[in-house]
Amino acid sequence: MSKQDSRIYTNLSALLALRDDSRHLSLSPRYRPAGMLSGRHASRIKGRGLNFEELRQYQAGDNIRQIDSRVSARLGKPYVRVYSEETDRPVHIIVDQRLPMFFGSQVNTKSVTAAHLAALLAWQVFDAGDRVGGAVIGCRDMVQMSPKRASHNVIHLLEAIVVANNQLDLASLKKNTINSISNSLLSQVRPLIATLNSQSVMILITDIEGIEIEELAELEILAQKTNVLLFVVQDPLEDDLTRAHGLSVSLGEQQINIQANAQNQQKYDALYQQRLTCLKKAVLASVLPVGLVNTYEPVITQLSRLLMGEPV
């Protein structure tokens, strides 16, 4: 399996090049994520930060609640404190690069799709004037970085994504690596969640294995005090096992031919499809802004549709 194949593994050059595509994203204030991802556009997200600009003499029409009583008493004239609204928000992009993401049946793996999505969002957020940070959850460890208004911070995030992405290798899996995927994405970033406030934005990028149904309720509660955006990456084969009929799966040494007969379909439905259907219904019924992203269409095309408010 070659790491030169861009459908299976990503690289830093590819993620850096996505900055040009991110500039073509059309943000609509009618759709909540457009406001969430933009520090310089009209926003519907909670919280408002204020930066102190200056003290000046009171003028007719000024808000009397902004009068500074101490300065006014000292100077003998009413003075007001002038503030400007703060639009620079900390955005945490949480990217899943664990083993379940290392799958794709048509064009890209889910892990590559997630990497492209994270890069597009990171560049869009940065160019909109917000601070970019987040965490990359890999098969070996988690890399976390604080949001900063600096391009090198975006690049560090992309580098962490590439490292985690390139570590995905079925042949070299160890027991402790396999155990690491048993925890949901949310459970691994709870320390980060504890630091969020009303100004913060948290963007989760994972797949159907990375989020539990009961955790959607937890995210909805979290969304009452901060801003949460969820992207779920899906492969078409996960929706319909019959698409895999006749395909072969290999780990390099052994090979299995997939027979999508009625018995296997029934087992698959019981093990996976039922959970997928329930989670899909829960996601679409959630009050959270949610985007479903597939592995075969260009990510920029899908993200443009989502940010314009089209149905997921």
Image (spheres, rainbow, N blue to C red):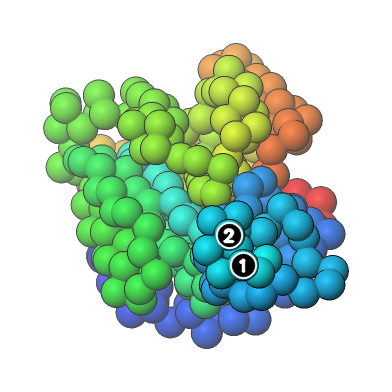
Nearer to the camera, 289 or 46: 46
Residue drawn at point x = 53 percent, y = 63 percent: 74
Q: Are marks 1 and 2 in contact (CB under 8 Å)?
A: yes
Asked which quadrant contains residue 58, the reply is: bottom right
Nearer to the camera, 23 or 87: 87
* Position of residue 311 in the picture relative to residue 272 (left or right): right
Question: Does 215 appear above or below 35?
Answer: above
* Position of residue 135 in the picture relative to residue 208 (left or right): left
Residue drawn at point x = 15 percent, y = 32 percent: 174
Residue 212 is at least partly visible in this image:
yes
Label of residue 73 in the image = 2
Q: Label 2: state its secondary structure.
A: helix
* Position of residue 205 in the picture relative to residue 76 (left or right): left
Q: Label 1: state its secondary structure.
A: loop
Question: Does 241 appear above or below 233?
Answer: above
Nearer to the camera, 15 or 222: 222
Residue drawn at point x = 60 percent, y = 55 percent: 69
